[in-house]
Image (cartoon, grey):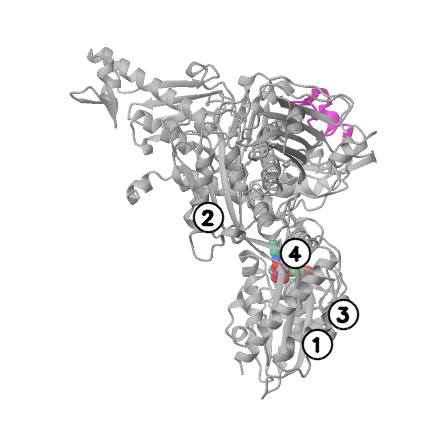
Amino acid sequence: MSNPTDSMSSVRPDLIEKVTGRAEYITDLVVPGMLHGFVVRSPVVHARIVSIDTTAARLIEGVVDVLVGADVASFGRWGVVLKDRPIIAIDRVRYVGEPVAVVIAETVEIAENAAELVDVEYEELPRATTIREALADGAPLIHERHENLEDFYFKGGARPTQNSNVFHTYRSSVGDVDAAEAIAAHVHEDSFTFPAISHFAMEPHTVIADFQGDALTIWAGAQTPTAVQKVLSRLFGLQLAKIRVVVPFVGGGFGGKASVKIEPLVAAASWKVRRPVRVAQSISDSMLTCRRLGAEITIRTAVDAKGRILAKTAKLLLDGGAYSDTGSAVATKSANRIMGPYVMPNLRLEASAVYTNTVPGAAFRSIGGPQAVWAKESHMDNVAAAIGMDPVEFRLINMAGRGERTRPDLRPLDMDMSELVGRVTQSPVFETQGSNRRARGLAVAATDPANTPIANAIVRLKIDGSVSVSVSSIEVGQGAHATMARVAAQTLQQRFSAVTTLRTDTDIAPYDWGTGASRSTVVVGLSVESAALDAADQIFDMVADVWELPKDSLTLVEGGVSTGSEVLTFHQIFHRALGVDSGEVVGRGGITPRSKKGALAESPLFWETSAGLAEIVVDEDTGQIHVPRYASAADVGRVINRVAAEGQDEGAAAMGFGHALFEELEFDDGQPVNATPIDYTIPRITDVPPVFDTILVENGDGPGPGGAKGMGEGAILPVAPAIANALFSTYGIRITDLPMTPEKVWRALQKRK
Amino acid sequence: MLTSPFTFEKPTTIADAIEAVGDSGESMFYSGGTELLLAMKMRVIHTERLVDIKGIPGLDRIVLTDANEIEIGSRCTHKRIAADPVIREHAPALSTLCDNVANVRVRSVGTIGGNLCFGEPHADPPTMLAALNARLVLQGQTGVRFVHADEFIRSELETVREPDELLTMIVFPRPTGPVTYRRFKHGERPSVNVAMAWSMEATSSTIKTARVRVGALGSRPQPLKAVEDALKGRSIADVRPAIEAVLAEALDELDINDDRHGGADYKRHLAGVLLLRNAEEAMTRGKRSR
Ligand SMILES: Cc1cc2nc3c(=O)[nH]c(=O)nc-3n(C[C@H](O)[C@H](O)[C@H](O)COP(=O)(O)OP(=O)(O)OC[C@H]3O[C@@H](n4cnc5c(N)ncnc54)[C@H](O)[C@@H]3O)c2cc1C
């Protein structure tokens, strides 16, 4: 335990701003002259737009204009992998909730009232609202053609099937699965499904756009501000340097604010009225903006007589919704993430992403991970049961060790998965009274974050010893800004309180890929570290030059530089070196795939890991599952901020409980059924395990600052299969579709009887 | 989303409030607003004028009358009822119910009157109040009338209250035996709930009468007549077999919507589970109070 004054001075500055109510989110900002937009959305599933009549809306006093598709058709389409998306529906709507008009008015009230007067006539088209319907013979094509943007956002692009609704297929094959299955002692196959799930960030999507001639400023809760900049630059023909994206505090993203969402729509509204325009969505609007991809998964494992895995096959179909967004990457990752930390000499993986007439799919905490791990870890217990082996034992004998590759094209494992299994099974929470050894289920995951090693940072050391850090990472509650400050403080040997991380603003912050894929601490953190070293080097140069001392005799100390015999303050150094009592040094640091002699280039940069052990009690009369105890373990390399790191792990697991027991964004023939915060249930604090153990394994062996690895997306993965496995071993029922609602469990218990 | 424009009034007497709402159909009473404002923001309710009843004194009283009846003012919040000493002493199950309705924000401003008048089928208090044989006092321009809790809700989101009638009070006889309540929910609101109130013979552990209501399954709470009859005059020790003998038949008579809260067969089964659990609790309570 550190002493209290120590810990107060190291409290994340953003948390103090938040608990005192000073923290500014987009809806707290007022841009002079700002108008308000209200989005009119499609009530129909798939239709041709026959006409849009905005006359009545325009007559309302205070309405400035109404944006419709015809205004912006000439700008063409945008996308980050496939260019499939109009700024606003032009002649056709593809899902309920698709924007068809934006009423722009002096106040939100006026805009919303006038929006009721926008009259849109639709002519319904045949629809495909599920994966099955979209793949059926003669299914209506949701997009007639597929235009791939190679290397635009992720390395690579999509592999669409022309004249079909399949917008991406990824295949990976190792060895000879058929031959392995032919000689196997057992081959076991299972099928699972996974629903669409809402991100449910507390702060819905909100954007202010200000178009000024050939320049555009955007205030958005964007996780990837430079992607927003790039898409807007291409779409509106503006120079990157003329587009400024400012990201104040963000009230949760979870991937739902990654890539690009409503920024083009709001920018177009501002373009049309030549004034700043704000669109502040409601949570219900955001539930119609994006969601996690649902999936249908078939998985097959062949084992030898001793229970060793000979081959694994998986076929995953992902429901990408009406526009592709990053669904292709989600599909690819789901195939990679269904492997797990096991030795599989023969592998055949295929994942496809499919358009349907529903809310567009998008990145969501561990893209493709929960879908894949739900199937693979449930399946592992089924295979173990089929061959009469203990499921933990079955995992352990098949686990790949540290340094082993699970697939030739992926970095060898950089952790001991068996260590994590040991840590959760020995967690003290299961030693407590009343714990029932027999009612437990285990699941593990090892995933490959797409942590694109491209980032830059600027660290400026001022004459008074204060330091500013400028990065494009956003502060979304995870503590990235404090982490960057801590890395700079440690590297420069200055107090944490001397360092300020600047609010994200692309006019100031250098290029970074974005905040997601568990990458910021590692990739941006390394950039900050090297920028800080660069700043230090410039200071040392000054001292070496002016005081005529060898550079290697100099070290940084709090407030200045030690020469070995004396401490020179930064003041003294700048004053003597520059002749005036002012100045700063600007340190620059960057990471590219070529940095560290190419050591960062191989994918993944690190393995994101998690093990989860759930203990359950089922009320067999109602089917309700209680999870009294849960242990979660992750290998994070090194903890930089313990409260934040544990919070990330616990938050991810809590989200996992939502996925496991409560959440499903439902569609009935394409109509959203529960896309409101009243009808959609996420877990409350009383719904998550009262006894929860977070175990963070630190071996200091990660690629990030001080040996850190990324984290925050792992703990969501084992929750659902761990609970399902406990249900299977204890109550003899196997649930294959989420969420595991009481009714579903009760029906399964009835069938068993 | 925001409400469409409306005007606002805050009268200080019942008569003024009723007058202000009038019979034009364009005004509505406004209490805690927890249902009303949501519905107005979602634009499923439009009203020209809100008449706030929070300025009327006396509507938030809770008393045990000389007639041995409990009166609860319609403007009492769930929080107020949960903490009230009279309710805690004489109807602790209602106190617990109110302590568990919705979430803390709704409990601290949402009222019992608003809950009843909204007529939402997936609600807790209507089931309990019907089991307690409560009467609701409605006051309109032409006078006061009493409506039994059983008859108050007409259909989903519709009650027998006329738009200009103010629900002023809920009255029920002080319970003379164990009152039990259970609900099952997975999500925001109850999927099914069961309330049971026994009145006991003064000197023995025999049930004089029993009232059993099952809620949230159809538009309004439904009695389980067969169970009530089976319990009448029964000794506490025989309760379980008495219920089990008629349960299947009684449950079969329930009118059950298939909705997002579950299939009819599941919810029918749950009603039986909750009923038996209530009975277990009532038996131990009934014995203890001897
Ligand atoms: C998130 C959420 C969860 C909830 N969960 C539950 C739950 O689990 N169980 C449950 O039972 N309930 C639940 N509720 C409902 C809650 O109990 C009600 O919202 C609340 O009690 C309504 O009271 P109010 O004073 O806010 O009513 P208001 O919203 O002010 O009014 C509701 C309606 O009643 C009318 N009205 C109000 N008072 C009077 C009166 N005295 N006379 C005549 N008409 C009147 C109004 O005109 C309006 O039509 C939930 C509500 C919310 C928002």
Give residue B259's position: percent from left, percent from top.
73, 54
Q: Amino acid at mark 1?
A: Glu
Q: Which residue is mark 1?
A: B228
Question: Tag on residue B249?
Answer: 3
Q: Residues within 10 Å of mark 3 (few under 14, many from 20)?
A: few
Q: Is residue A76 covered in magenta? A: yes
Is residue A250 visible to us here? Answer: no
> What residue range appears in magenta?
A67-92
User: Label 3 is found on which chain of the structure?
Assistant: B
Q: Which image quadrant is residue A465 in?
A: top left
User: Disc 1 to disc 3, how far (Cα)?
Assistant: 13 Å
Q: Toward the viewer: A534 or A127? A: A127
User: Label 2 is found on which chain of the structure?
Assistant: A
User: Disc 1 to disc 2, how far (Cα)?
Assistant: 45 Å
Same chain for labels 4 and 1? Say yes or no.
Answer: yes
- Tell me which label, 1 or 3, sits earlier in the chain: 1
Is residue B234 visible to us here? Answer: yes
